[in-house]
Image: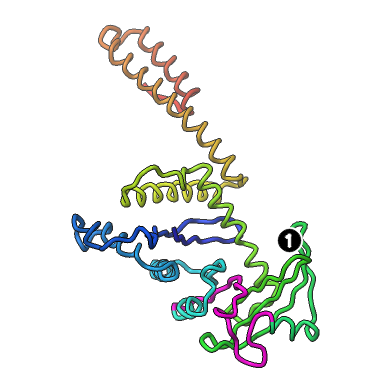
């Protein structure tokens, strides 16, 4: 599955997703769309499932931008960190930040040093390095603007821990190395969002082989997730989604019980109304019911 999310410092909202058909499971279009109208959403969904991941991702970004989503940058993982993907995103008017795979077949630059390792080894003695940390992990880093045949100027950030070398890239060369690293750290919030989706909303636990049913189930999971994220966002005391989920679950159970009691009360009133109409006993009964519903439901019933 390929998905697109919107994230800021406070919340992460799921925007779009697509189920890609594995190469081993692909069939001719006529085999699974002959009962679907070619203009239906089901047909379009299954058709796009034949596209590659990069194509699906760019298509979703394009849809989001056309719907009015305003974003400062596109943050992707290393799978999508390919020159053509960066270029396609740039043509849509959005800059990309990603961790680059250290693969000379994918990333080859212009100038004296062609590969990522060659650039790092050539610049490390010359560049001033800066220190930082993420939790308990301490690192040093420096940045440099390089030239690429397709992308032109692109900024690379070389981050070194005592275990490995990580390389980040941004098509926006005005950003500092620290900004690029801080932005990439936000991927943790996105990954946490998917963890919450799996733990509380049944994401990834779909037990259905019908393509349209899978689309519907995942859509409901993401819609419910977004609803709780919004509630948490407007709350003055934000909680983790797990805490909010459990609190709302208790409140909904209490509301369901209270509504059931309220319906029983209304039924009893209808049954005894004819016998006690206009009597003091009925007035007393209504007063008792009003007090009870106020306690259970939080409002007063008027006679």
Helix, strand or loop under label 1: strand
Q: Position of residue 198 (x, y in %)?
A: 51, 46
Question: Overall secondary structure of the magenta stretch?
Answer: loop
Seen at 34% across and 65% down, the residue is 50
Seen at 39% across and 66% down, the residue is 67
Foreground residue, 91 or 113? 113
Mark 1 crowdedness (10 Å alpha carbons): few <14, some 14-19, many ≥20? few
Relative placement, left or right, of 97 versus 176 is: left
Relative placement, left or right, of 167 versus 50 is: right
Foreground residue, 124 or 290? 124
Q: Which residues are magenta?
A: 92-117
Q: Is residue 35 above or below residue 139?
A: above
Image quarter hosting the N terminus: bottom left
* Location of residue 25 by image quarter: bottom left
Seen at 37% across and 8% down, the residue is 280
Q: Position of residue 15 (x, y in %)?
A: 44, 59
Image quarter hosting the C terminus: top left
List the residue tagged with mark 1.
Answer: 134
């Amino acid at each position: 599955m390929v998905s697109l999310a919107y994230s800021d410092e406070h919340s992460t909202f799921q925007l779009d997703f697509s189920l890609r058909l594995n190469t081993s499971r692909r069939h001719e279009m006529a085999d699974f769309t002959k009962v679907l109208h070619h203009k239906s959403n089901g047909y379009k969904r299954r058709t796009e499932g034949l596209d590659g991941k990069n194509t699906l991702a760019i298509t979703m970004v394009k849809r989001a931008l056309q719907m009015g989503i305003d974003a400062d940058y596109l943050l992707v993982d290393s799978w999508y960190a390919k020159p053509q993907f960066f270029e396609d995103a740039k043509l849509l008017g959005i800059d990309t930040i990603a961790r680059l795979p250290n693969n000379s077949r994918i990333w080859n630059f212009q100038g004296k040093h062609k590969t990522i390792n060659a650039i790092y080894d050539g610049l490390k003695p010359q560049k001033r390095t800066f220190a930082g940390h993420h939790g308990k992990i301490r690192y040093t880093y420096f940045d440099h603007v390089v030239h690429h045949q397709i992308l032109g100027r692109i900024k690379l950030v070389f981050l070194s821990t005592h275990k490995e070398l990580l390389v980040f890239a941004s098509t926006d060369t005005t950003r500092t190395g620290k900004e690029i690293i801080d932005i990439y750290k936000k991927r943790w919030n996105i990954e946490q969002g998917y963890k919450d989706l799996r733990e509380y909303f049944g994401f990834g636990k779909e037990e259905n082989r019908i393509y349209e049913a899978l689309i519907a189930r995942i859509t409901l999971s993401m819609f419910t997730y977004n609803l709780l994220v919004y509630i948490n966002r407007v709350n003055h005391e934000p909680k983790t989604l797990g805490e909010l989920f459990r609190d709302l679950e208790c409140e909904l159970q209490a509301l369901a019980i209270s509504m059931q009691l309220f319906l029983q009360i209304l039924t009893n009133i209808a049954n005894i109304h004819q016998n006690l109409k206009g009597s003091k006993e009925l007035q007393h009964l209504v007063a008792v019911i009003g007090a009870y519903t106020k306690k259970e439901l939080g409002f007063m019933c008027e006679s």
